[in-house]
Amino acid sequence: MSDTLLLFLNLAGIGFFAISGTLLGERKSVNGFGITVLATLTATGGGTIRDLLLNKPVFWIEDSIYLLTNFVAIMVSILFIRRFPSPDNRYFLIVDAAGLALFNIIGIFKATQADADLVVALTMGVITSVFGGILRDVICREVPVTLKNQLYATTCIAGGLTYVVTTNLGWNTYICVGMAFSTTFVMRMSAIYEGWRLQIFSQKSNG
C-alpha cells in the first residue's frame, strides 16, 4: 500500500469517526468541549492503542494533520447539526460503519508492516476499528455496541480476512482495499437494517 493511499484512508477514517462522535455528542446534549472530547476519542482512540501495542510512535503525535482533520470534521458536523437540528440516526450509523471499515484495513496493514502474524493482524484491525467507539460509548454511559448482540467486530474480521486473502493473491491494492471496505461496510449495514444478530450468552434457568 502506498503512503498516499494509507494517508487518505487514515484521514477519511478520522473524519468519519469524528463525525460519528459529534453526532452522538449532540444526541447526548453535551457542550462544545464534550463534543470535542467524544469525537477525538472516537477518531484516535483505537489507533492510539494499536500503536502502543505495536510499540510504534502514536500516529497523531507523529503527524498533527490527523488532529487537524479531526477538528475540521467536528466543525463541519456542528455546522451540519445547526443547519439540520436532531439529524436522523441513520447518519450516525452510516459514518460509523464507514469509519469502522476504513480503520480495520489500516490496523491490519500497520500490523503486517510490524511483521505480525495473521491472528495479531486481524486483532489489530479490530482494535483500531472498535476501541475508539468503546471509549466514546463508555463515557456516554452506553453499553458499547461491540458488546451487544449486533454484528460489529465480526464484520471487521470478515473484512480483514478479505483484505489478507486478496493481498496474498497479489491483487491490485485498490481492489484489495475496495473489497475489504465493502465487506465490512455492507455486512455492518445489513446487520443494522436486516436485523442480523449474534447469540447472547445467558445462563439457562433451572425452571
Image (cartoon, grey):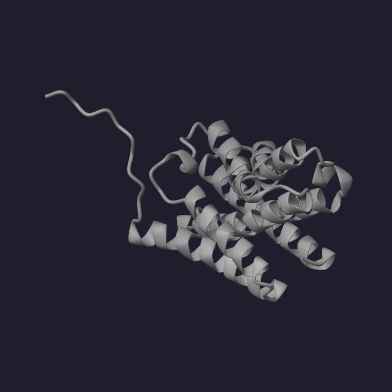
Relative to 2, 91 lies left or right: left
Q: Quadrant of the C terminus?
A: top left
Relative to 70, 21 lies left or right: left
Residue placed most toward the observer, 193 or 71: 193
Q: Quadrant of the N terminus?
A: bottom right
Residue placed most toward the observer, 197 or 120: 120
Can the viewer see residue 77?
no
In the current view of this chain or complex, which residue is farthest to the left?
A: 207
Residue placed most toward the observer, 24 or 60: 60
The vertical placement of 69 against 167, above or below, is above
Residue placed most toward the observer, 88 or 150: 150
The vertical placement of 52 against 179, above or below, is above
Q: Can you tell which quarter of the image residue 171 is in?
A: bottom right
> What residue appears at the point 84 percent right and 53 percent down from the top-left corner?
65
The vertical placement of 49 against 80, above or below, is above
> What residue appears at the point 81 percent right and 46 percent down from the top-left corner?
59
In the current view of this chain or complex, which residue is farthest to the top?
A: 206
Q: Can you tell which quarter of the image residue 136 is in?
A: top right
Can the viewer see residue 13?
yes
Relative to 155, 100 lies left or right: right
> What residue appears at the point 47 percent right and 43 percent down from the top-left corner?
145
Q: Where residue 52 sits: x, y (%)?
A: 76, 36
Q: Where residue 115 sits: x, y (%)?
A: 76, 49
> What residue appears at the point 48 percent right and 51 percent down from the top-left corner?
154
Q: Where residue 49 sits: x, y (%)?
A: 70, 38
